[in-house]
Image: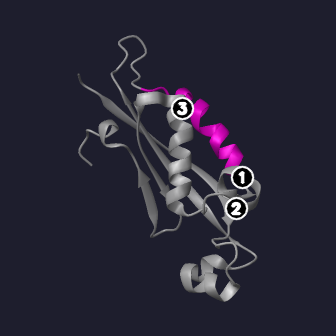
Amino acid sequence: MEHVTVTKTYRFSAGHRLAIKGLTDEENFRIFDTCSNPGGHGHDYYLEVKAAGGIDPVSGFAVPESVLDEAVMPVIEELDYKRLDIEVPYFSGNQPTGENIAEYIWKRLRAGLGKSLVHIRLSETATSYFEFYEEETYPYER
């Protein structure tokens, strides 16, 4: 079966602190460097969401943007302008690293988009990004 991938980029801003409870600020600094700043720090994140499907013969769409938006916007609204380690319950028990944020977003989107979700890329800085996909959902060459 032929598929078309559709990618849309979203933006949100969030802060976080990486720290292990029970360690001193100095110990956390040795592990997490400046990401352990007690006051936290923020990022402007860019989230690329890639979904795939066959082209509908009537609408001409593989995955309508409105379908992506319906799945993605509630997640963006949950994270946007939040201190993740304090305000988002999932991260009270999971370090809000880029890897864990990407995994969290993937799980939330997978619930709404199902198998049409192929891949996400979460850019934390201009030079750092995190990709999440499951092997069976990413049969396409990058």
Seen as rendered, the residue at the extreme front is: 22
Residue type, mark 1 in image: Val
Residue type, mark 2 in image: Asp
Q: Is residue 112 above or below residue 11?
A: above
Q: CA separation, marks 1 and 3?
A: 18 Å
Q: CA separation, marks 2 and 3?
A: 23 Å
- Whether 77 is among the magenta residues is yes
Q: How crowded is mark 3: few (under 14 residues within 10 Å), some or many (20 or more)?
A: few
Nearer-the-camera pick, 84 or 56: 84
Q: Is residue 65 visible?
A: no
Mark 3 falls on what kind of element? helix
Residue at 62% across, 86% down: 27
- Direction from residue 105 to residue 49 in the image, left or right: left
Q: Is residue 47 above or below residue 112?
A: below
Q: Is the magenta stretch mostly helix, strand or loop?
A: helix
Disc 1 marks which residue? Answer: 88
Q: CA separation, marks 1 and 2?
A: 6 Å
Dot 1 and dot 2 residues touching (CB under 8 Å): yes
Counting from the top left corner in percent of width and height, residue 108 is at 57, 39
Counting from the top left corner in percent of width and height, residue 63 is at 44, 27
Q: Which of marks 2 and 3 is nearer the N terminus?
A: 2
Q: Residues within 10 Å of mark 1 (few under 14, many from 20)?
A: some
Which region of the structure is painted magenta? Answer: 63-80
Mark 2 falls on what kind of element? helix
The disc label shown at residue 85, or none: 2
Disc 3 marks which residue? Answer: 111
- Direction from residue 4 to residue 141 in the image, left or right: left
Residue at 67% across, 70% down: 17
Q: Is residue 141 above or below residue 34?
A: above
Residue type, mark 3 in image: Ala
